[in-house]
């Protein structure tokens, strides 16, 4: 992890510091900033990662009894800066083996530069398309986290029953799925509700969702 001076850490609770901006053929603009003692990765319209303040997943993990779940291997589709492994290790004291799928090489570069090197958990990063990975890879995972956004939009191929069926096939017995979706506006909620009823439930009939700080986290059961 890139070290931050103590004075800047303190001031970050009052001011947001710009750290670095890069672009790629996937994301035109990727901003890294330092705020509230954490690195934040954002695009023009969305926050991709914000440490343990990435509250949608944090709130979801708080509602799950992680101690009672048999989790070893975790697949993250849409890795960002690595908020999920960071909060699970630092805040929830869970050390898992992670496979992170991220299509943008620049996001992987930023994650390795600012976050993942400080973690003890084993993390394998793979730069590829999430759908292609699921079609080729047959490994089973105890937890799959889906956080697949381009800016503030989920690409259409990740909203199809075909994709969800592949996800289901990659879950181990009693494995848990967490699928992050926007629900901050009435239009967001309508789109997420339609997806949940028309696409998600046919694949995961016992599915449910958690309303978490302007997002929905869809669960397989």
Image: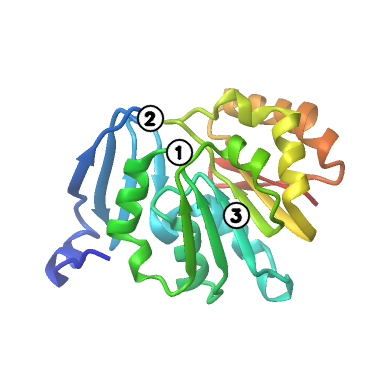
Q: Are marks 2 and 1 in contact (CB under 8 Å)?
A: yes
For the point 34% across and 61% down, the residue is 115
Q: Residue at x 53, y 77 (%)?
A: 93
Q: For the residues marked 2 and 3, what is the alpha-carbon distance in whole angstroms? A: 21 Å
Asked whether the beta carbons under mark 3 and mark 1 sit within 8 Å of each other, the answer is no
In the picture of the structure, the residue carrying the numbered disc 2 is 26
Tag 3 secondary structure: strand
Q: Which residue is mark 3?
A: 75
Quarter holding the N terminus is: bottom left
In the rendering, at what x and y percent does residue 22 appear?
Answer: 23, 38
In the image shown, does 51 or 70 lie closer to the viewer? 70
Residue 117, position in %: x, y? Answer: 34, 67
**Label 3 vs label 1: CA separation?**
14 Å
Q: Residues within 10 Å of mark 1 (few under 14, many from 20)?
A: some
Residue annotated with mark 1:
103
Q: Is residue 42 above or below residue 92?
A: above
- Is residue 78 shown above or below 43? below
Nearest the viewer among 91 and 162 is: 162
């Amino acid at each position: 992890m890139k070290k931050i001076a103590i004075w800047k850490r303190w001031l970050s609770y009052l001011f947001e510091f710009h750290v670095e901006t890069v672009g790629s053929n996937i994301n035109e603009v990727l901003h890294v900033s330092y705020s509230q003692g954490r690195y934040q990765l954002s695009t023009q319209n969305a926050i991709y990662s914000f440490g343990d303040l990435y509250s949608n997943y944090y709130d979801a993990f708080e509602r799950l009894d992680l101690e009672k779940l048999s989790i070893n291997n975790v697949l993250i589709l849409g890795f960002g800066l690595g908020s999920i492994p960071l909060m699970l290790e630092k805040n929830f004291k869970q050390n898992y083996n992670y496979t992170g799928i991220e299509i943008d090489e620049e996001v992987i570069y930023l994650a390795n530069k600012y976050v993942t090197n400080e973690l003890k958990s084993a993390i394998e990063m793979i730069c590829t398309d999430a759908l292609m990975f699921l079609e080729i890879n047959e490994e089973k995972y105890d937890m799959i986290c889906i956080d697949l956004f381009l800016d503030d939009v989920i690409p259409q191929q990740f909203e199809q029953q075909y994709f969800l069926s592949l996800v289901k096939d990659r879950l181990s017995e009693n494995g848990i799925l967490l699928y992050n979706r926007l629900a901050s506006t009435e239009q967001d909620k309508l789109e997420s509700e339609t997806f949940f009823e028309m696409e998600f439930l046919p694949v995961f009939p016992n599915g449910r969702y958690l309303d978490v700080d302007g997002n929905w986290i869809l669960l397989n059961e």
